[in-house]
Amino acid sequence: MIKEINVQDLKTLDHPILVDVRSEEEFAEATIPGAVNLPLFDNEERVLVGTTYTQTTPSLARELGLSIISPKLPQLVKKVEELSKNGPLVLFCWRGGMRSKSLATVVELMGIPIYRLLGGYKAYRSQVVDFFLAKIPYQVVVLRGNTGVGKTDLLGRLREEGYPAIDLEKLANNRGSVFGAMGLGDPPSQKKFEGLLYEELVLLSKFSYIIVECESKRIGRVTIPSNFYTAMQEGIQVLHYDSLKNRIQRLLKEYTSVPNALHEIGVALERLIKTLGHVKVRELRTLLEKGCLDVFTERLLVEYYDKLYAYPNEPSSEYAFYLNYQEPVEALRELECYLDEKVAQPNGKSAVFGVQVQSDPLNIGVFVKN
């Protein structure tokens, strides 16, 4: 018998293998993060069946669908069997309808244990939408600082040491600047971005706070959900700064590692004409073409980015905490002490893993080791 499970109960399964049986196009638009795609219909077949359903009759559409799926069943079942070796299988489609039910029936007849997600991806999407309509159940710590100070590096170090840091730019596949998309591949859809952010928050639900980098409401092609952005604006603001020399070297290391970097930078420069004017952009292009990358980067920082963001490059009492990142390890320890003593402890919550947590903000039943 096929076991049916709702989206709220997914978290009770031990490392479930989520199988999205929708078309490649639907899967690419958005899916449950971590799912694998095993389409019953390809993009063209889905359109054909859908057109038959709406323009003729549902019975003819079902017959057409059966004729398309039947030759594929042996291979589909074989793939499902392979996947089942890695954990409990959960099949889903758009609304938990015919596509997931038909494959689940065949798989179950072959003796392979299977779950089917009630409501399909639509139920999952509704859960995400509802979450981002309510107040975010976290205190948000926001790292603010000028371009190149190492905020992304610091977030990575914090996450490695068990702190609840989220790299929004990584989720958005964009560094949040004119040159932000270089070397990062295709950006996610808005639905996919929200799903990825939601899963990050679920993963960190044992904490009373999260740490992010300051971002505009829009990162590349995606938009930060309004309630999350409001929580960022109302959160604890931490100033992060570094020397100009270090910032230049950090940016050079990051961007010149991108394939075809100089060409991509040259193309992106055109977007700065409106702000900097034709003369300055032409001067920057000349520096780029001559390979004067240090001077090129310094001018970009001083003449464009620092004026755009206008954060202090020195200690400032306007922030809850400030951090000099010239010595990254030392700065990391200072921030960790601040988080442990000033952010986590007043609420009686754990700052790092290994300590019993006293709350579950998302109410999903997270278990934490002592």
Image (cartoon, rainbow, N blue to C red):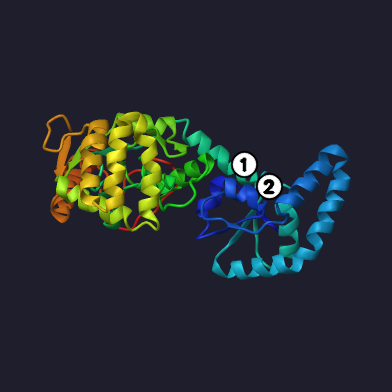
**Label 2 close to label 1 by CB (< 8 Å):** yes
Q: Which mark is residue 96?
A: 2
- Residue at x 46%, y 38% (from the top left corner): 222
Q: Of the residues under marks 2 and 1, which one precedes in the sequence?
A: 2
Report how many numbered discs are placed on residues in the image: 2
Asked if residue 172 lies left or right of residue 244, the reply is: right
- Residue at x 62%, y 41% (from the top left corner): 122
Q: Which mark is residue 361?
A: none
10 Å neighbourhood of mark 2: few (<14), some, or many (≥20)? many
- Does 369 appear above or below 236? below
Along the line of sight, which residue is nearer the eye, 78 or 135? Answer: 78
- Residue at x 49%, y 49% (from the top left corner): 186
Rendered location of residue 196, percent (x, y): 47, 47
Instruction: Determine the image quadrant of residue 179.
Output: top left
Asked if residue 266 lies left or right of residue 337, the reply is: right
Q: Amino acid at mark 1?
A: Lys
> Would you say residue 268 is visible in this rendering?
yes
- Does 311 appear above or below 121? above
Element on which disc 1 rests = helix
> Would you say residue 353 is visible in this rendering?
no
Rendered location of residue 220, percent (x, y): 43, 39
Rendered location of residue 305, percent (x, y): 26, 37
Which residue in the protein does label 1 denote?
Answer: 122
Along the line of sight, which residue is nearer the eye, 246 or 219? Answer: 246
Placement of the N terminus among the 4 image quadrants: bottom right
